[in-house]
């Protein structure tokens, strides 16, 4: 095939000759209904209590996602042109990508391997034989007039994805759900249409044309935006762990189409609308919840849901109809004549005469799959006895996990204590100052030393928190140094502690009276006063005992 890169500056003029040009979301006149979006938290949305039963009362949302994941590969699906984000327009385009006559597709083995690995990680069956088809669209950014995809027989089918999120009444319960994966198909990405409104023209960039995509199609089994967002986040993490897709949604490496309908449980599914190309999990949740509410209100007003394509408008957090898909689309599917069936093998069943190094071997890919996020979380919970929600935070951030594990390795404190410090003190300050874990002024070694001082009873936990803040401000110092410099060691002299307590008791007669009358909570206030005076150096157990004794005499 001819797959050499060619500069295609002249491509920009072709759009003027084409009838159909995709319309950008921003150009659509938004006739959105401004209404509150009710956020579903894993249960049917509550309806206001009215005497008259409304049409949509009891109806629930149904959501099915189609996710386009750009394959992390050096070159495109059927050509040798490089795959790179933010390259100069039309600088990564082979003759094949521009659909010049006489060019033929050559399948990229890496893309097939990525789809097989993704299929295996999502518990799919891998079809040993799959087929390529042409799906016809007439868009300026698709010069061949069709997309090569896998309509009839995709590479992977019948999988499932398990995902979790914090739900429940107070949003503090881990809810775990599962969605079935219908199929994963290999297909080409399109180019990009860039609308130059001041000059009333559309420019075409074909750098993305022909980049390998995995379209992951889920069954319509979710019920609200929150579930869909959690499923996408889990998928994103799996793809990143596998290295099959970089998963950066803002850069368009992972794009979600949300199919949404409403129905009465137990009855057939309603008519779906499809909200296209959503590029953040947060927007996905908003788009779905808005769409469920819009459909319910439409039915309430006696209307009917149209099977249409819509876009999410970030500015108004609403969905709006897309003009380019108003008409019924006939894709005129046909088998791709220039590609034979795609076959993948197991190492034991390679036909004689074929070179295994040229083949995609399913069992070998299965054997070298990395540890998946769910397995890693379970391992962390079991090894360190930490809460499942903490295992989620750690697995979402490799560097945080490394940090936690290095502290655990070098301190005598229990991992359950270490996790508290990492999640509260460390992550708290990192978030407050918008820092990455690699920028933490407190190293794992320093935190481990601090926790050892606490563990050995040399400092109180409030003093330890103070030391941590000081370490943050003076990187390079050790915990011991700060304890010594600021005299933060636990007060070991009981006489000294008694004298401070006596002063506090003498200066807080009202509180003492309240405690005497049985309000034990006020004792904490007095303890706080002593800790203020001692910079948190008093042993809380000893302190409580002394104060109790003083107020009860
Ligand atoms: N009634 C429904 N409500 C919500 N989602 C649905 C409903 N029926 C089907 N879906 C979802 O719609 C999606 C259909 O995707 P599929 O790729 O099979 O077809 P398509 O949308 O017609 O094709 P494409 O968008 O790729 O051209 C699936 O994710 C499925 O779960
Ligand atoms: Mg689809
Ligand atoms: Mg679709």
Image: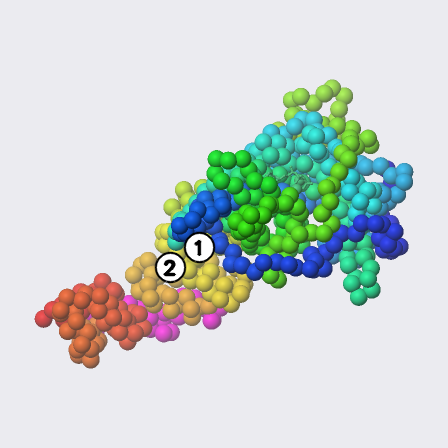
Q: Magenta residues?
A: 473-496
Q: Quadrant of the C terminus?
A: bottom left
Instruction: Check contact, mark 2 vs mark 1: CB within 8 A.
Output: yes
Q: Is residue 270 left or right of residue 10?
A: left
Q: Badge 2 is on which residue? A: 451
Quadrant in the picture for residue 447: bottom left
Q: Is residue 348 magenta?
A: no
Report x, y in % for residue 478.
43, 66
Near mark 1 (Cα within 10 A), the count class, few <14, some 14-19 or many ≥20, is many
Q: Real-space Cα distance between discs 2 and 1?
A: 9 Å
Farthest residue, direction top? 352
Residue under the point 38% across and 46% down: 385
Q: Decide which of 276, 204 is in the foreground and name it.
A: 276
Q: Is residue 182 visible?
A: yes
The circle on residue 127 is none
Q: Is residue 397 above or below residue 511?
A: above
Residue 1 at x, y percent in the picture: 86, 37
Q: Is residue 192 visible?
A: no
Give the answer, above or below, for where 427 lies relative to 136: below
Q: Residue at x 41, y 66 (%)?
A: 468
**Could you tell me which secondary element the residue under label 1 belongs to?**
helix
User: Which residue is under mark 1?
Assistant: 407
Q: Quadrant of residue 502?
A: bottom left
Q: In this view of the protein, which residue sits in the foreground, 306 or 149?
A: 306
10 Å neighbourhood of mark 2: few (<14), some, or many (≥20)? many
Q: Residue at horizontal 67%, vertical 54%? A: 251
């Amino acid at each position: 095939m001819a797959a050499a890169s060619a500069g295609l500056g002249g491509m920009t003029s072709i759009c003027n000759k084409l009838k159909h040009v995709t319309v950008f979301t921003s150009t659509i006149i938004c006739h959105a209904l401004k209404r509150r979006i009710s956020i579903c938290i894993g249960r049917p949305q509550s309806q206001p209590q009215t005497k008259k039963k409304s049409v949509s009362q009891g109806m629930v949302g149904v959501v099915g996602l189609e996710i386009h994941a750009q394959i992390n590969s050096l070159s495109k699906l059927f050509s040798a042109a490089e795959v790179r984000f933010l390259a100069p327009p039309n600088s990564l385009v082979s003759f094949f990508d521009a659909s010049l006559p006489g060019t033929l597709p050559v399948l990229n083995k890496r893309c097939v391997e990525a789809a097989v690995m993704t299929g295996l990680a999502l518990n799919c069956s891998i079809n040993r034989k799959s087929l390529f088809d042409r799906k016809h669209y007439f868009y300026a950014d698709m010069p061949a007039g069709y997309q090569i995809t896998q309509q009839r027989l995709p590479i992977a089918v019948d999988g499932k994805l398990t995902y979790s999120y914090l739900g429940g009444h107070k949003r503090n319960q881990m809810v775990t759900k599962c969605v079935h994966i219908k199929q994963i198909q290999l297909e080409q990405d399109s180019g990009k249409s860039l609308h130059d409104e001041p000059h009333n023209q559309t420019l075409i960039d074909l750098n993305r044309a022909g980049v390998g995509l995995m379209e992951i199609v889920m069954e319509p089994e979710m019920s609200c935006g929150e579930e869909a967002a959690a499923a996408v986040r889990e998928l994103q993490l799996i793809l990143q762990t596998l290295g099959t897709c970089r998963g950066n949604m803002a850069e368009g490496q992972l794009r979600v189409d949300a199919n949404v309908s409403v129905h009465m449980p137990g009855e057939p599914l309603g008519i779906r609308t499809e909200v296209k190309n959503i590029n953040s999990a947060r927007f996905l949740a908003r788009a779905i919840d808005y769409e469920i509410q819009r459909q319910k209100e439409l039915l309430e007003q006696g209307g009917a849901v149209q099977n249409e394509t819509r876009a999410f408008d970030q500015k108004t957090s609403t969905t709006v109809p897309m003009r380019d898909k108003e008409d019924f689309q006939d894709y005129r599917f046909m088998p791709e004549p220039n590609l034979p069936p795609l076959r993948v093998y197991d190492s034991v069943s390679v036909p004689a005469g074929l070179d295994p190094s040229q083949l995609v071997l399913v069992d070998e890919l299965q054997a070298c799959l990395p540890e998946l996020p769910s397995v890693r979380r379970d391992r962390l919970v079991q090894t360190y006895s930490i809460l499942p929600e903490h295992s989620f935070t750690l697995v979402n951030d490799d560097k945080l996990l490394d940090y936690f594990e290095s502290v655990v390795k070098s301190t005598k404190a229990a991992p359950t204590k270490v996790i508290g410090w990492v999640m509260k003190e460390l992550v708290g300050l990192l978030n407050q100052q918008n820092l990455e874990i690699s920028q933490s002024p407190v190293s794992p070694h320093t935190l481990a030393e601090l926790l050892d001082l606490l563990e050995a009873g040399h400092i109180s936990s409030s003093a330890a928190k103070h030391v941590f803040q000081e370490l943050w401000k003076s990187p390079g110092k050790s915990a011991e140094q700060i304890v010594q410099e600021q005299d933060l060691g636990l007060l070991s002299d009981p006489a000294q502690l008694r004298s401070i307590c006596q002063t506090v008791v003498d200066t807080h007669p009202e509180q003492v009276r309240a405690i005497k009358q049985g309000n034990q909570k006020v004792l904490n206030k007095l303890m706080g006063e002593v800790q203020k005076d001692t910079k948190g150096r008093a042993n809380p157990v000893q302190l409580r005992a002394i104060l109790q004794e003083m107020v009860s005499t």
